[in-house]
Image (spheres, rainbow, N blue to C red):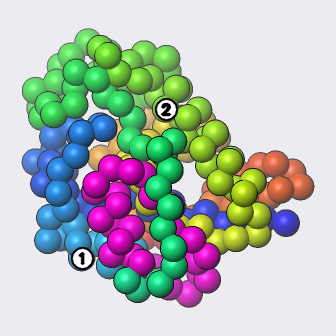
Amino acid sequence: MKTNLYLARHGQTQWNEVQRYQGQLDSALTLLGKEQSKKIAQQVLNKKIDLIITSPLGRAVDTAVTCQKTLNKPIINVDGITERDLGLWQGQYANNIKNEIHYDEILHQFTALKPTDGESAIDCGTRIFNALKTLITNHKNKNLLVIFHGEALRCFLAKIGQQSTRNAYDLFANGCTLHLTYNHETKNFQYKTLEAK
């Protein structure tokens, strides 16, 4: 018995385009972002998706709604998969904070350090892990398209043993889709393929 998860980063936003950290703030999809959203749906068109799950942030919801037009499947919002809270770094341009103390450790590693008033990578990864485990338990043997965020994706993958020393911008292009399976007998995630980048 297994559940398939197709984890997709939302389409490009206005802030992504200028490398401005969004965290739990938001900005609208660009024209490219809207096209990338359509491509996500095409990437999973033959995967027999049963349900589209999205973070409640507007950029993820807009991506999910675009996918729904092609996939014709219901959408549910799940608060637990929202983007990492980057605290006082939210709204800042990457170039303006890259010299901050612990910048590399906070955004490239999986540690308990966090920006001021923000969330650590470990806390974010654990939150995403718990939210996805609940979804998997409630949707056994289903194929789920999950629309969420680059940094949340980085933290979650680190939580299940897929650690990297690169940041989310480098790891996950807007509109990329990764395939994970969850085996209900062994209770393990298996990272399968990078569908597109």
- Kindly identify which residue carries mark 2: 124
Asked if residue 47 is among those painted magenta in the image, a careful observer would answer yes
In this picture, residue 139 sits left or right of residue 36: right
Res. 20 in view: yes
Number of numbered callouts drawn: 2
Q: Position of residue 194 (x, y in %)?
A: 51, 64
The local secondary structure at tag 2 comes to helix
Q: Position of residue 132 (x, y in %)?
A: 62, 49
Q: Position of residue 96 (x, y in %)?
A: 10, 27
Furthest residue toward right: 185
Taking depth in this image into account, of 143 and 102 the one nearest to the observer is 143
Asked if residue 13 is among those painted magenta in the image, a careful observer would answer no
Write the residue at 38% across / 41% down. Answer: 83
Looking at the rendering, the stretch of residues picked out in magenta corresponds to 41-68
> Dot 2: few (<14), some (14–19), or many (≥20) neighbours within 10 Å?
many
Callout 1 amino acid: Glu
**Quarter residue 37 falls in:** bottom left
Res. 154 in view: no
Q: CA distance from mark 1 to mark 2?
A: 28 Å
Mark 1 or mark 2, earlier in chain: 1
Callout 2 amino acid: Cys
The local secondary structure at tag 1 comes to helix
- Kindly identify which residue carries mark 1: 35
Taking depth in this image into account, of 21 and 77 the one nearest to the observer is 77
Q: Position of residue 120 (x, y in %)?
A: 44, 23
Q: Are marks 1 and 2 in contact (CB under 8 Å)?
A: no
